[in-house]
Image (cartoon, helix red, strand yellow):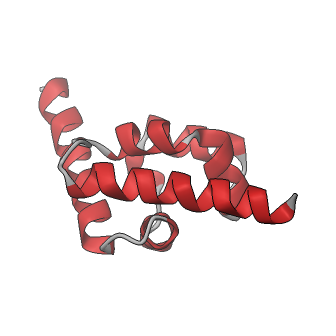
Amino acid sequence: MESSKNDSKRQKYASVHHLLSTGYFTTITDLIEEYGKMALVADMPISHKALTRRLGNLEYFTMGELRRIAELIDADPVKISELAFGEMRQAARKKR
């Protein structure tokens, strides 16, 4: 049973990694929604409440948390940071 669970996780990671590498995601929020908030909470030392708060204001994400997301999906941490900063830039433009 545990092996099946790990295989399922690996498939999810690989799927999200593939979508990221093809340019499918334009925001960190899109990536996290595809990954699944509950799955991310289970795989990171973060509570659902804290993740929801960070998604409401991306500036609350730490660099370590963005790096951990990158590690989970075997992606370049710079790419994950670029998604987050790009989304913050879009939000700032909308506020003007």
Q: Residue drawn 46% across and 57% down? A: 61
Q: Is residue 57 above or below residue 85?
A: above
* Left or right side of 47 for 54: left
**Front-most of 87 and 93?**
87
Q: Residue drawn 53% across and 51% down? A: 12
Query: Residue 51: in sight, yes or no?
Result: yes
Q: Position of residue 14 (x, y in %)?
A: 44, 59
Callout count: 0
Q: Quadrant of the N terminus?
A: bottom right
Q: Position of residue 50 (x, y in %)?
A: 64, 47
Q: Quadrant of residue 74?
A: bottom left
Q: Residue drawn 19% across and 26% down? A: 95
Q: Is residue 2 above or below residue 22?
A: below
Q: Quadrant of the C terminus?
A: top left
* Left or right side of 32 for 4: right
Q: Position of residue 23 (x, y in %)?
A: 18, 48
Query: Residue 84: in sight, yes or no?
Result: no
**Front-most of 6 and 31?**
6
Q: Residue drawn 76% across and 57% down? A: 4
**Front-most of 73 and 66?**
73
Q: Quadrant of residue 2?
A: bottom right
